[in-house]
Image (cartoon, grey):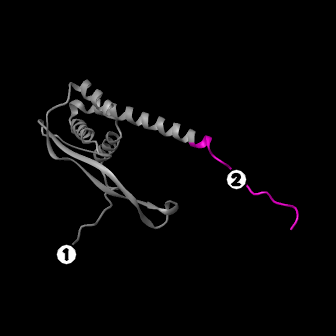
């Protein structure tokens, strides 16, 4: 009897799955205004049936001491998720930190639109703009942090 080899889902994703994963990650960090503008450019928010949620719950955040140590439970975070189906049959998933159900549903609608060739470019444009905004915010935060950095050093005395 032959058994199926187990693979790590993180390393065996197809190019389309990788693109969708990245799209969902970026939509999770898009602001409501960014999503509403993108939907306006597409022609408005399409009708969508809720398949799941939007619902809010908790997830456990895990960490590693020093990035390589043993896993430990850091704490819980509130997340909201939604799954919708458009009239075309496209299914979309949305999730975000916090309890904003409207934003999670908009993310799911945009993910579903990203699965449709007619709207993929508009959704990719939104995701690219979100990525640029996130990069700028991260750079600003890094600069602010660097400005408060304190360098410690040890002075060696000549006598023992």
Q: Nearer the viewer, residue 126 or 154?
A: 154
Residue placed furthest toward the right? 159
The boundaries of the magenta stretch are 145-160
At horizontal 25% and vertical 25% (from top left) the residue drawn is 40
Residue placed furthest toward the bottom? 1
Residue linked to disc 2: 152
The numbered mark, 2 or 1, whose residue comes first in the sequence reads 1
150 shown above or below 70? above
- Give the x, y percent position of residue 11: 35, 56
Q: Nearer the viewer, residue 90 or 30?
A: 30
Q: Nearer the viewer, residue 77 or 70?
A: 77
At horizontal 66% and vertical 48% (from top left) the residue drawn is 150
Residue linked to disc 1: 1
Q: How many C-alpha atoms fall within 10 Å of the one at disc 2: few (<14), some, or many (≥20)? A: few
- Give the x, y percent position of residue 132: 43, 34
State the quadrant of the C terminus: bottom right
12 shown above or below 18? below
Q: Please state which of the two labelled residues, at mark 2 or mark 1, is closer to the viewer.
A: 2
Q: Nearer the viewer, residue 128 or 52?
A: 52
130 shown above or below 62? above
Q: Determine the CA span between mark 2 and mark 1.
A: 63 Å
**Circle 1 — which element?**
loop
Q: How many marks?
A: 2
Q: How many C-alpha atoms fall within 10 Å of the one at disc 1: few (<14), some, or many (≥20)? A: few
């Amino acid at each position: 009897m032959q058994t199926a080899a187990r693979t790590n889902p993180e390393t065996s994703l197809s190019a389309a799955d990788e693109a969708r994963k990245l799209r969902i990650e970026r939509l999770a960090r898009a602001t409501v205004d960014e999503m509403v503008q993108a939907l306006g450019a597409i022609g408005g928010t399409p009708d969508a049936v809720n398949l799941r949620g939007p619902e809010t719950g908790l997830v456990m955040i895990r960490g590693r001491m020093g990035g390589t140590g043993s896993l430990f439970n850091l704490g819980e975070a509130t997340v909201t998720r939604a799954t919708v189906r458009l009239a075309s049959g496209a299914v979309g998933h949305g999730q975000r930190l916090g309890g904003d159900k409207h934003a999670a549903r908009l993310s799911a609608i945009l993910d579903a639109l990203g699965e449709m060739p007619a709207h993929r470019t508009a959704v990719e444009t939104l995701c690219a703009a979100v990525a640029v905004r996130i990069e700028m915010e991260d750079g600003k935060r890094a600069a602010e942090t660097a400005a408060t950095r304190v360098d410690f050093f040890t002075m060696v005395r000549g006598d023992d």
